[in-house]
Image: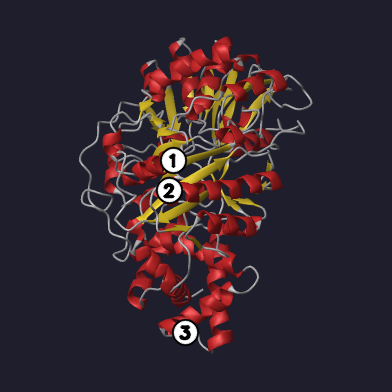
Amino acid sequence: MSDGVLSGAAAAVLGIDDIRARAVAARATRLAAAFPGTAVVGLRAAAAMLNAAAYATAGAGLAALPPDRRQAVCDAVAARPGGTQLLDALKVFFLLAAAESRHATPPPAGGHGTRPPAGRPDPPLTCVVADDWPARATADVVVVGSGAGGAVAAREFARAGARVVVVEEGRRFTVEHFRALSPADRFVALYRDGGATLALGSPPVLLPQGRGVGGTTLVNSGTCYRTPVRVLRRWRDAYGVAAADPEHFDGLLDEVEAMLAVAPQPTDVLGRNGELALAGARALGWRATPLRRNAPGCAGSCQCAVGCPRNAKNGVHLTALPEACAAGAVIVTGARVHRVFVARGRAVGVRFGDREILAPLVVVAAGAVETPRLLRRSGLGGHPQLGRNLAVHPAVSVAGRFAEPVVSWSGVLQSVGVEELHDDGVLIEATAGPPGLVSFLPPGYGRPLRAELDRADRLATLGALVADVPGGRVGARTVRYRLAPTDADRLREAIVAMGRILLAAGAQEVLTGINTHPYARTPDEVVAAASAAAATDLHLAAFHPTGTARMGADPARAPVDPAGRLRGVAGVLVADASVLPTCPEVNPQLSIMALALAVCRPAI
């Protein structure tokens, strides 16, 4: 496809002039190099289809049309079945590429467009690039993955005196990377598939996963909820996970909170976005409070999702992994483990590339998507439930337009929790991000979208997570997810609740995130918009995949036993989000780390 087709699509979708469109198209092409091939093909096909529609309706390609004719093409495509999905896919792509362009909403002084003050220094880590690792090595324990679960496993075994090697597919990122690179460049570098991992379904769901030393803790919001007692009791009683007994698990959560320096977010850097969420919830008499976070030095740069430029967020790359390395652990970077070796029914090591590490114990902590794939590649995927039962915490976002500036990207990215509906499985959080990198998708295409972007500084944004029925499955190449009808209902309930909060805080109107009914000015109008929305009308994202190798006492239901041991083979522990029996109903970092402690300590 020619550059003219891509730049014409960018001009039409974003409502920008040809010079800016060519710059966006060039940047989009460069960023897309990090995407999987299927995503690139799909995006280019979408641009070609939009260009073909221009020929069909206007007799020329988009690049040759004046702005009003481009707008007419977008409007015509949006009116067709599936047209809004096509345009939205292009919109997300082009907004990412435009995030650093001059026409994007400008940042406040000291925001993401300027180099931030120096952050705290990175602690020492013993990292070796895979190409520099010997062809064959030995260890007492090999840990696959350096995220929340893998880092804790490495820390525990290394501090017990074991020779530990952590094998990590991603690279090591330092605070200098976070300070020097633009948010968009960091986004595609820090996430698997450039952030374009997609769970196929109706509707499809973006499923971003961090990749680097520290895993998704590099790019999560820093929100640290303790596992709800009702969830722990469910894991204990329905799945037979004795370690989840609240009296025991609370002590593990205490330990993890101390490791991460978890504390309530101070209000001095909360930002206007969080302040409005608090004001709206309190006006309704709803429970709301600043979130507990692992970011004691947070200065409100609103860049948690692309790596903190001040090293203020205590991901495991700043906490558990340095402690592991201080005790002798080594991290091999840029190493994708192809298989776990097994001999006589017992794990004996791993292979990555043309290199091997022999060890009598392998801890698999590659995440809920990659762990089942690794086990299958290793011939260990015989359990019928492995890769199934995927929960993804589906999420929707809503914005409110205010008369005065909000500048949501100045302050804490995820700042306030509203828990009024949490007992019903709906958790609302005030959440924002750098322009072009937020989960809320502004409505419209062309000139209407351009108008929205030009006044984005007046928007406050909220997001809601729904504790879902496990409806997904991880295959060798694809992830599939089916949104349960009850979860779609709760997502609609969440949209209504978020609209009420924003209107109670003084919003002039609510941007619902629903293409068929994008605006509402009263609570009744929000209810009408949400009630009329089909599941395919919802703009979904997902952030916390869990459950694909769930642990439990029933061998028929759970690939992993209550002690974290993979069934059917000796010497393999699983210690990541894949073992959580159900959706934890909260941001899961503390749950994963505490469960990793419970899995690893008895094996020492």
How many C-alpha atoms fall within 10 Å of the one at disc 1: few (<14), some, or many (≥20)?
Answer: many
Residue 582 sits in quarter: top right
Looking at the image, which residue is at 65% across and 14% down?
242
The reply, left or right, for residue 304 in relation to residue 564 is: left
Residue 293 sits in quarter: top left
How many C-alpha atoms fall within 10 Å of the one at disc 3: few (<14), some, or many (≥20)?
Answer: some
**Residue at mark 1:** 281
Q: Are marks 1 and 2 in contact (CB under 8 Å)?
A: yes
Looking at the image, which residue is at 54% across and 41% down?
465
**Residue at mark 3:** 69
**Residue at mark 2:** 504
Give the amino acid type for the residue marked by disc 3 in the picture: Arg
Placement of 36 over or under 571, stated as above or below:
below
Placement of 99 over or under 55, stated as above or below:
above
How many C-alpha atoms fall within 10 Å of the one at disc 2: few (<14), some, or many (≥20)?
Answer: many
Front-lying residue, 185 or 378: 185
Whole-percent x, y for residue 555 in the image: 77, 22
Distance between mark 3 and mark 1 Cα atoms:
44 Å
Front-lying residue, 352 or 239: 239
Callout 2: SS:
helix
Q: Which marked residue is nearer to the observer: mark 3 or mark 1? A: 1
Give the amino acid type for the residue marked by disc 1 in the picture: Ala
